[in-house]
């Protein structure tokens, strides 16, 4: 298929900036006070003075999303990738689907399924930085490409949000799961372009880049969730095609969509029950109007803001607005570290940590920082079997066994 390069649109600058500026303030607060409306961070290696929020309770059932058959047909011509075989970090050959490589020689490769999973947060991408480019939430396309290479080399593999929230994690033995999230529906994340009368994924977009990367490395994964503000209407993923076509194609490729509120609402400032139900229910209603079977499964809090009144926070997870129900099995903050799993006592489905993708200027606790600083025991390392929970002895302090229903828990003595 012929490809036409279209430079990313700047139409979303305003929307992104409104998010980003507040995120920056939030990060500053976070790193200095470890308190307030943003996720605080705990560096198990070398960040004294910051602490992790208490994480309690869990709601981990998931609803399926669906995708339009027409979108699948549209996508299939350009998104098919052939299965590949690549060496794992431990030198073991692992194949792509249908089944991941499973290992049981645990002491030899040290799986840890109580480790943390990075949920990476992206906002916007540009061809090149300019003096006026926002510093923290903008990456170049080249940075993104390089990041994919780095993550692949370091043994990370993408999983869906649904798998993250259900705890049914399927990556090959020795590999580390990771979730990609994209906020605000910008054109540089994903949009369509016209190639000789055919709609195709814009080459200069994160999805376009991820697709090409998967042609080379099909084991990496084409996964990710896009948190949308449906009040932006046709300015969501602005470009060719209708919004319905863009969303259908995105879902057809296997990506997910999530709630980012109708109106990009900061619930720390506007956080009554009615505020939440309107912002979340109306956003769901608008998605249903475009894609009747698509149910948002997760919410990314604009500005990381949540209601000051703790008693009202459950309305982030579920509610109803003028007959439209919404349900978010995970509510995501804006920073600043990898998340514990759903099996962990500290997991709070109403406030799940994300890691900010490294922007124009690297800062402490961004993704590059974590990749450099995190110790070997930080991350979740799979045994390849989604039906087991393999834990090194001594690493099960925070395990809540009843959350691992249906999974076989296996403890092993790590190699000395
Ligand atoms: Zn946003």
Image: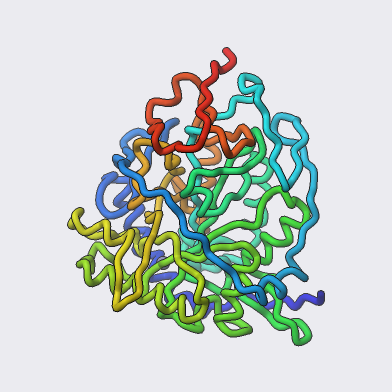
Q: Nearer the viewer, residue 406 or 176?
A: 406
Residue 264 visible? The answer is no
Residue 349 as seen in the image, left or right of residue 312:
right
Residue reaching furthest to the front: 406
Ligand 1, image quadrant it occupies: bottom left
| Colouring | rainbow
* Residue drawn at point x = 31 percent, y = 70 percent: 265
Q: Quadrant of residue 398?
A: top left
Residue reaching furthest to the bottom: 197
* Residue drawn at point x = 42 percent, y = 70 percent: 17
Q: Is residue 103 above or below residue 107?
A: below
Count of all numbered marks drawn on residues in the image: 0
* Residue drawn at point x = 30 percent, y = 66 percent: 319
Image coords of residue 162 (percent x, y): 51, 54
Quarter holding the N terminus? bottom right
Residue 298 as seen in the image, left or right of residue 69:
left
Quarter holding the C terminus? top right
* Residue drawn at point x = 56 percent, y = 47 percent: 178
Q: Nearer the viewer, residue 392 or 125?
A: 392
Image coords of residue 158 (percent x, y): 60, 50
Image coords of residue 358 (percent x, y): 52, 53
Image coords of residue 101 (percent x, y): 71, 36
Q: Quadrant of residue 58?
A: top left
Residue 135 visible? The answer is yes
Q: Nearer the viewer, residue 107 or 358?
A: 107
Residue 245 as seen in the image, left or right of residue 389:
right
């Amino acid at each position: 298929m012929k490809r036409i390069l279209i430079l990313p649109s700047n139409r979303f600058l305003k929307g992104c900036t409104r998010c980003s500026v507040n995120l920056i303030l939030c990060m500053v607060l976070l790193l200095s006070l470890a308190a307030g409306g943003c996720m605080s961070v705990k560096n198990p290696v070398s960040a004294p003075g910051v602490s992790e929020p208490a994480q309690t309770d869990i709601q981990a059932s998931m609803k399926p999303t669906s995708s339009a058959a027409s979108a699948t047909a549209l996508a299939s011509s350009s998104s098919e990738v052939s299965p590949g075989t690549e060496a794992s970090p431990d030198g073991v050959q692992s194949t792509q689907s249908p089944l991941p490589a499973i290992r049981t020689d645990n002491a030899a490769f040290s799986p840890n399924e109580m480790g943390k999973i990075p949920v990476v947060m992206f906002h916007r991408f540009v061809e090149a930085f300019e003096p006026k480019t926002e510093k923290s939430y903008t990456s170049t396309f080249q940075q993104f490409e390089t990041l994919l290479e780095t993550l692949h080399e370091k043994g990370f593999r993408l999983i869906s949000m649904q798998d993250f929230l259900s705890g049914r994690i399927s990556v090959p033995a020795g590999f580390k799961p990771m979730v990609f999230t994209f906020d605000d529906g910008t054109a540089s994340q994903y949009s369509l372009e016209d190639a000789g009368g055919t709609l195709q994924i814009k080459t200069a977009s994160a999805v376009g880049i991820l697709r090409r990367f998967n042609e080379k490395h099909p084991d990496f994964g084409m996964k990710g969730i896009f948190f949308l503000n449906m009040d932006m209407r046709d300015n969501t993923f602005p470009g060719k095609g209708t919004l319905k076509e863009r969303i259908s194609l995105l879902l057809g490729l296997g990506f997910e969509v999530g709630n980012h509120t109708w109106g990009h609402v900061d619930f720390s400032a506007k956080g009554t029950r009615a505020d939440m139900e309107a912002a979340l229910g109306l956003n769901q209603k608008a998605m249903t109007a475009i894609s009747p079977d698509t149910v948002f499964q997760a919410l990314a809090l604009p500005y990381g803001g949540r209601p000051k009144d703790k008693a009202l926070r459950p309305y982030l997870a579920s509610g109803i607005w003028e007959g439209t129900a919404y349900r978010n099995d995970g509510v995501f903050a804006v920073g600043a570290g990898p998340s514990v799993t759903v099996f962990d006592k500290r997991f709070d489905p109403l406030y799940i940590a994300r890691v900010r993708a490294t922007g124009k200027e690297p800062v402490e606790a961004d993704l590059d920082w974590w990749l450099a600083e995190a110790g070997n025991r930080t991350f979740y390392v799979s045994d390849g079997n989604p039906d087991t929970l393999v834990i090194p002895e001594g690493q099960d302090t925070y395990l809540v066994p009843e959350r691992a229903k249906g999974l076989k828990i296996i403890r092993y003595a790590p190699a000395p």
